[in-house]
Image: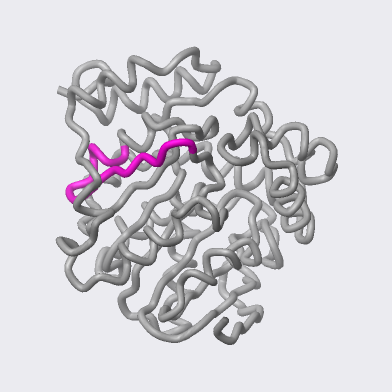
């Protein structure tokens, strides 16, 4: 594997842990809620030939914990500052889970910096459709990062996919996560930052070709959310991967790494199988998907419904 450089850099937002791997085409990886850069190692092994830059979001990993929740717009500005430090004029960007939220903001605010965008297992924020109540309750507490037993007991119903049945892999993921568990204040701050953010007004502004990847067994971010994101993107396409859950991009056995590499490697998108085989989302398909989602937990259900009503025509659905 290519040489790895880990260091802390100081920005107006605080000290930020940054990891750089390899040489080649520039690629920025933005990780998820409570995650740290070490969790990208399995994907790094599949991405030879790229200059990969990653950073711990404020509140997680080895980055500083803000005293107050940092707005997503400011986190996206921090991502641009990280790109500047590594002289990444224009780069491909992969945003996973919460990182997908940051990536949406980044691509809307600094379109000239994003060549292609890949959104994995993510959400449009306010306006999203919630997953099962059990998953929503589990994600709102950092206790699972403090107790290995709680982590093992809850991870399957939270993220689905391989985590439902592969105990060895669950133990490996737990060891990786517990290596740098997020402080509770940082974790709750990240949750608060996402709670007041919505990508619905931003998505129509994103001009980069954008591939949206999701698993069909992801309790945390149901497929309807990826359909909503794709529908609003001017150049968005959706790929739903059967049997995969929320952690699929961190799982070498999922095959997602190969899709990521192909999407970012080909010179012309018409030569990318994952892009050409992916689909757009029509208004009819989106409306059916939104109607098909089950019980929504209040009061967030009301907030999300209001956001959809504001940003989607005809009572929260699409015309």
Could you say where residue 295 lies in the image, as x and y percent from the top left?
49, 13
Could you say where residue 275 lies in the image, as x and y percent from the top left?
24, 54
Can residue 139 be seen here? The reply is no
Q: Nearer the viewer, residue 175 or 207?
A: 175
Residue 232 drawn in magenta: yes
- The C terminus sits in image quarter: top left
Q: Nearer the viewer, residue 191 or 236?
A: 236
The picture quadrant where one finds residue 37 is bottom right
Residue occupying image coordinates x 19% and y 18%: 314
Residue 309 as seen in the image, left or right of residue 142: left
Could you say where residue 236 lies in the image, as x and y percent from the top left?
23, 48
Residue 37 drawn in magenta: no
Residue occupying image coordinates x 66% and y 26%: 137
Residue occupying image coordinates x 72% and y 35%: 141
Residue 211 as seen in the image, left or right of residue 220: left
- In the rendered structure, which segment of residues is drawn in magenta? 229-243
Can residue 135 be seen here? The reply is yes
Q: How is the image coloured?
A: one colour
Residue 91 as seen in the image, left or right of residue 39: left
Q: Is 108 placed above or below 64 here?
A: above
- The N terminus sits in image quarter: bottom right
């Amino acid at each position: 594997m290519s040489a790895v450089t880990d260091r802390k850099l100081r920005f107006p937002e605080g000290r930020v842990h940054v990891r750089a791997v390899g040489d080649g085409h520039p690629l920025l990886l933005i990780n998820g809620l409570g995650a740290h850069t070490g969790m990208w190692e399995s994907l790094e092994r599949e991405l030879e030939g790229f200059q990969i830059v990653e950073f711990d979001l404020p509140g997680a990993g080895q980055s500083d914990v803000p005293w107050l929740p940092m707005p997503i717009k400011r986190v996206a500005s921090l991502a641009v500052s990280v790109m500047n430090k590594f002289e990444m004029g224009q780069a491909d960007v992969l945003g996973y889970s919460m990182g997908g939220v940051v990536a949406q903001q980044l691509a809307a605010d600094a379109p000239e910096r994003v060549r292609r965008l890949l959104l994995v297992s993510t959400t449009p924020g306010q306006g999203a459709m919630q997953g099962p109540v059990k998953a929503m309750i589990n994600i709102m507490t950092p206790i699972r990062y403090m107790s290995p037993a709680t982590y093992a007991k809850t991870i399957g119903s939270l993220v689905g996919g391989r985590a439902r049945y592969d105990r060895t892999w669950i133990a490996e993921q737990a060891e990786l996560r517990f290596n740098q568990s997020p402080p509770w204040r940082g974790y709750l701050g990240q949750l608060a930052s996402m709670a007041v953010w919505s990508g619905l007004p931003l998505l129509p502004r994103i001009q980069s070709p954008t591939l949206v990847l999701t698993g069909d067994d992801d309790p945390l971010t149901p497929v309807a959310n990826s359909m909503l994101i794709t529908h609003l993107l001017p150049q968005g396409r959706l790929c739903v991967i059967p049997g995969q859950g929320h952690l699929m991009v961190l799982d070498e056995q999922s095959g997602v790494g190969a899709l990521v590499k192909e999407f970012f490697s080909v010179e012309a998108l018409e030569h990318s199988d994952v892009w050409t085989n992916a689909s757009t989302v029509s208004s009819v398909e989106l409306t059916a998907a939104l109607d098909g989602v089950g019980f929504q937990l209040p009061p967030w259900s009301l907030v999300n419904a209001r956001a959809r009503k504001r940003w989607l025509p005809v009572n929260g659905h699409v015309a």
